[in-house]
Image (tube, rainbow, N blue to C red):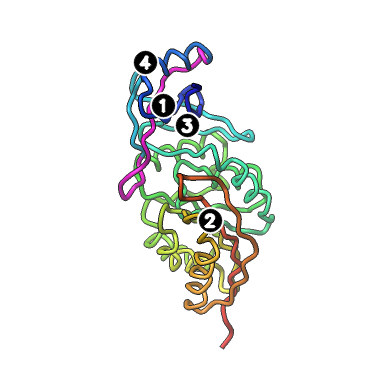
Amino acid sequence: MRPRYKVVGDVALVRLRDGEDPKEVVDYLLGRLPRLRAVLAYEGVGGELRLPRVRLLHGERPVVTRYAEHGVVYELDVERMMFSLGNKFERLRVAALTRDWEVVVDAFAGIGQFSLPIAALGRAVFVHAIEVNPEAYEYLVRNVRANGLEGRVRTHLGDCREVTKGLEGVADRVVMGYFPGTIGYLDAGLRALRPGGGVVHLHDLVEGGSEEEYCARVVGGVKERGYDVRLLRTARVKSYSARLDHVVLDLLCLPRRP
């Protein structure tokens, strides 16, 4: 049976099935992808920083790789930080939506998964990229530099709930996704919007069949905070697990007039 795996740069991430022999899986992959430098068994994510749980099956540490997507280059330590290949078209979609007068705030920037393509491929005039994990932040800074985006991306180390207090009213567009529980960060996202409002792209994990209920919760939460809101789009980005889907809500949020 063919192993379940994804390749990031020259590193393979494998989801082992019950009973699968790790050595046989490694031999299979190296036989077909001889350029692989490391193979990791992926076992999910955990903790407040959403760090990957992985086991090194082949190769040496540190498991640092470079990965190119849509002409944007990312460097990361695959053992220490997440990079979802399943989001590639969503990254491109959001970049394409930006306008040449927009300022974008990326509330959970990671290594730059959304910030970099928005700045490199989109038309936004400026991007504020916020990341709380110091290790991921180090790679975010490195990736901004590697893509020549120092003049268009400003990086911020810290919790978006605090950092946005210094970015109040700057954004025309906000990208935010913290799995699970992005809805708990609504105040931070809305705080960053310009006084006239803007668009929030909210990513979260939703149990299959409960999408409508979740959308109602998010829309209700935005309204409770004094905004009129229009749900521009909701879509399933990818399957996350047997019962959870990664969904994105595009929300036009306009301050309610007295």
On the image, numbered disc 2 is attached to which residue? 175
Mark 1 or mark 2: name the one nearer the start of the chain: 1
On the image, numbered disc 3 is attached to which residue? 75
Q: Nearer the viewer, residue 223 or 109?
A: 223
Q: Nearer the viewer, residue 35 or 76?
A: 35
Instruction: Quote the CA–CA distance across marks 1 and 2.
Output: 26 Å
Picture layout, residue 221 above or below residue 152: below
Q: Residue at x 66, y 54 (%)?
A: 98
Q: Residue at x 55, y 65 (%)?
A: 212
Q: Amino acid at mark 3?
A: Glu
Q: Which mark is residue 64?
A: 1
Mark 2 or mark 4: name the one nearer the start of the chain: 4
Instruction: Quote the CA–CA distance across marks 3 and 2.
Output: 21 Å
In x, y percent, where is residue 145?
51, 37
Mark 3 or mark 2: name the one nearer the start of the chain: 3
Q: Amino acid at mark 1?
A: Val
In this picture, which residue range is highlighted in magenta?
Answer: 33-51
Q: Amino acid at mark 2?
A: Val
